[in-house]
Amino acid sequence: MEWLAALTAGGLAGIGMWLLLDRNLIRVVLGVAILGNAINLGVLASGRFAGSEAAFVTATTVPADPANALPQALVLTAIVIGFGLFAFALAVLKSVRESHGVTTTDRVTEITEEPAPDIEEVGLQIHQDDADHHHDAEEVRQ
Amino acid sequence: MLTAVFAIAFAALLAPPLARRFDDRAGWLLAAVPLMAFIWFVMQIPVIARGEVVTATLAWVPALGIDVAFRLDGLSLLFALLISGIGALIVLYAGAYLSDHHHLGRFYAYLLIFMMAMLGLVLADDLIAMFVFWELTSVASFLLISFQHEKAVSRRAALQALLITGGGGLALLAGLVLLGIAGEGWRFSEIDIDAVEASALYFGIMVLVLIGCFTKSAQVPFHLWLPNAMNAPTPVSAYLHSATMVKAGVYLLARLNPVMGGEQGWSDILIAFGATTAVVGAVLAIRQTDLKRLLAYTTVTVLGQLTMLIGTNTTYGLQAFVLYLLAHSLYKGALFMAVGAVDHSTGTRELSRLGGLLKIMPLTGAAVGLAAFSNAGLPPFFGFIAKEFAYAGLIQMGITGWIVTIAMIVTNALLLAAAGLVFIRTFLGPQGHYPREPHEVSVPMWLGPMLLAVAGFLLGAWHHWPETWLVNAAVQSVARGDVDVKLYLWGGITPALITSLITVALGVFFYRFRHQVRLQIARWRVFWGVSGDLIWDRFLKRVFEFAALTASAFQHGSLRLHLTLLSLVLSSVVFISLAIGGPALFTGGDYAALNTPAVIGSILALAGASAAAVMRGRLALVAALGASGLGLALFFLAANAPDVATTQLMVETLTVVFLAFVLRSMPAIPRVADEGAISRAAHILISVLFGLAVAGALLVVANVPLAGNIADWYVQNSYPGGKGGNVVNVILVDFRAFDTLGEIVVVALAGLAAASLLGGGQLAEMTRKGEPEFGSVLLRQAIRPLAGLLVLVSLVLLWRGHNLPGGGFIGGLVAAVGFILVVLTFGNYQARALMWVRPTLLVGAGIGCAVLAGVIGLLGGHDFLKGLWFFPLGLPLGTPLLFDVGVFLTVFGSMMNMMQRLAGRPV
């Protein structure tokens, strides 16, 4: 079991890294998910698969050969947190796409290092607001 | 002692509001605090003079053996008296000097913080505590020099001082740590002198400590920050940069002299650097026309002489050190304050414009006169005794001493000339031309210089008093053995007296022919061509260039290059360790037997992931990723981890839904082959290496027997300790609940961050008119009961999770899946009607429940998050259950929050 888990985790990690290295942001996000899975499996495997049954006890009995429960608890939360990260990555992907219209990593770097494209628009907006305020003030006076 | 330090720190806190409330009168209030400290220290004089020490200890980091341990001996007492006494006068003086400055309160605060740190520095017995105070003085000095921060010169000077003294501080820290290791003790009083001298670290300790002390005390070549620091307001120059802070380095040298002074190298270095500094300072001083800079360079000279005197290690030398330290603090503090008063009154500090001030400012003039006499080393002032002893100390040393003595005669003569410039040029002679109508300054401004100058006179004239009470004890703490102190003004015709006479004659000569002397000095072009400040600026520029180069090499902004570097380093670290360990690493493992579901799960996971890696169709991608996750869930199930498997299953379901929501608005994914063959090959290589490294590392781990029996402990204690049958759940909500609390906060934050990235504060519309995503009638009929069932199931899972598979995490995920089904089928409006609470509120309530569960434990008199159980009507209720409810709500709320944002379309 352990060597199978090690090879699977290694394979998933390799695929995850391959996706992370891709230029396309969608693949990068998938890479985050797959690499996360690989690491979860790795953590579980490092706790060994020694037990022959799941770790459940009752008030009176304790199983003779239970599985290691600690890495299971760690991985359980790690899965949920990993999903939180994945959702966050998706949110980044979506907002990058919506605000810049691009989905390649190198382009994103270029864009973020340029001055924000909406600065001038905001500037205009402020002037308009000022004008509006004047307008409002005049109206109030009248 | 502790009270004194804390009281001053407290006064620093109070200073800004007080200054706002009482303006410059706040100075009188604030000066009372150091004054009281001064009185306390004065009261300790008899105790210390008897040869006793006063100690006080406050545990600080007991685990590391670091205490704020204070120890008052002769040397500390001398410094403490100077710091608190001059400090009180300076606070008063500052109130008048900066009375119209709108940040006076801030200035008081910095000044008092410095005072606190400086007192701590000289009192601390603990090496580490001393270092912390040491650094604090550097920081306070930075703040004070840059007090007039609107001026670029001030900022530059402050930064220069901070970088030089801070850099020296780093060296000092290393030196002190080595000293603690070599001396087998972390107190100055407990260091084993013989062990240090025998230690192989001795040379390293010496160099590092010396760098720290030399930077702080402005020894050549680190002296250049001190004259620049004169950009600070005059009270700062008087207090920090002449009387106290710059003496910290000298203090530490003196403090360590008994420990380190056994080797000849220590003495040689101190004498060499000290003498050089003294000569350089004196020559530079006589060239200055700005009174303040002139005083700054004479301070450099004196610091050099003090360093040198420690190096002599002779009886007279060490006595001279203590005397000179005291004398210098008194007269230099007085001179600086007086020069500040002159500046304040006339508006200039230029020597050429000053003159004849004695008539207008008689009190300040008298103070300067007294101080200048002491500075010049003329009898019967204290400065004379100090100088006399210094010569005697040097002469005691034999031939080296004589050579240094000649250098000292010239230096002292130059100092005498400088003292003459300060007093005669400024206060006597014809009236100068002033930018402002000069006037005598207010009481707080002349009081300080007058008291200090008079003290210098009194201590000299009645020298039995300091001899008995102060100097003796201080010399004992500096010397390696017992020393008998006998001060005298007239010791007969000794070589020292003759040297003094030569000095005075030479000094008068220098003053008389000062213009020629200056001209002569100005001829040494080679010498002036080397400007320390220019070198410093070039050095800083190089540093910044280097920093920019390094940063751009590693912070290039390319995600792919970052990842490449990261994974290659990681892989090579693993491969190198594997190569070192050899094949033996992979044998000896006790593998569990394979089972069929695990094999199928692995194959599915790998196949799904590979498909996701190469396919282009968005739907196929989603399906492949889902299959990979399902395979993993199957593996978890086969590995006897049902809770993990369920979680993975639910998360995978949500992953597929979320991904589908986002991908539908994305453009088609280009083929992998578009990238070019070379980069593709490189990526394949990197990925394969990374995968092999991960697999290899895990295989090695699996071949090492599992250490300890934590797993057994959890199984044995799950029921007795946690009242639950599901060990995994008990670990999550009871044994390691604090971890879980942190983890649900992370989940909540991820959800909030994702939400704020998308659509700011408002909800994006799900679909344009809240229409369902799927139009199927069949689905619409079936989904409602199904979703209801799922929510019900989630509650059951939550309830039974403590004993059977389930729990807050799984329950929350199942409930989220149920709701998402409703959204998919009926659209946003329906879903919102069902979801009557905002998701963020749920998240808050969840974390609130979890924290409450912890606080109940606290209220019950136990630890935070201690599990407490009650059995009303036979129902097992307990804080772990409440905690699990918190987990449920947080996970559910976060998932709903993310879903609502991610599913929104751009409007």
Image (tube, grey):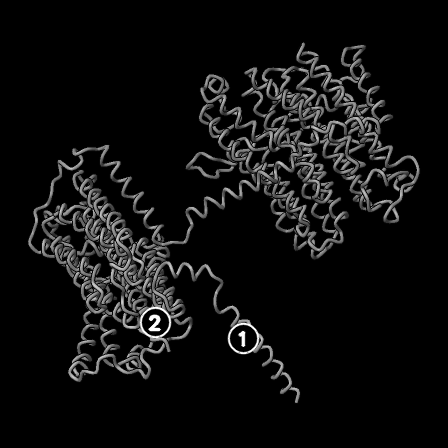
Does residue B619 lie above or below B22 as drawn?
A: below
* Disc 1, SS: helix
User: The numbered mark 2 sits on a residue in which chain?
Assistant: B
Q: Is residue B18 left or right of residue B873?
A: right
* Disc 2, SS: helix
Residue highlighted by disc 1? A125
Amino acid type at mark 1: Gln
Does residue B507 lie above or below B403 as drawn?
A: below
Residue at horizontal 59 percent and vertical 42 percent from the top: B139
Q: Quadrant of residue B213?
A: top right
Query: Which residue in the rendered view is the most extreme toward the left?
Result: B596
| Labels 2 and 1 within one chain | no
Q: Is residue B349 left or right of residue A130?
A: right
Pick the quarter of the image with the C terminus of chain B.
Answer: bottom left
Residue highlighted by disc 2? B901
Residue at horizontal 24 percent and vertical 47 percent from the top: B685
Q: Is residue B879 left or right of residue B608?
A: right
What is the C-alpha distance between the residues marked 2 and 1? 27 Å
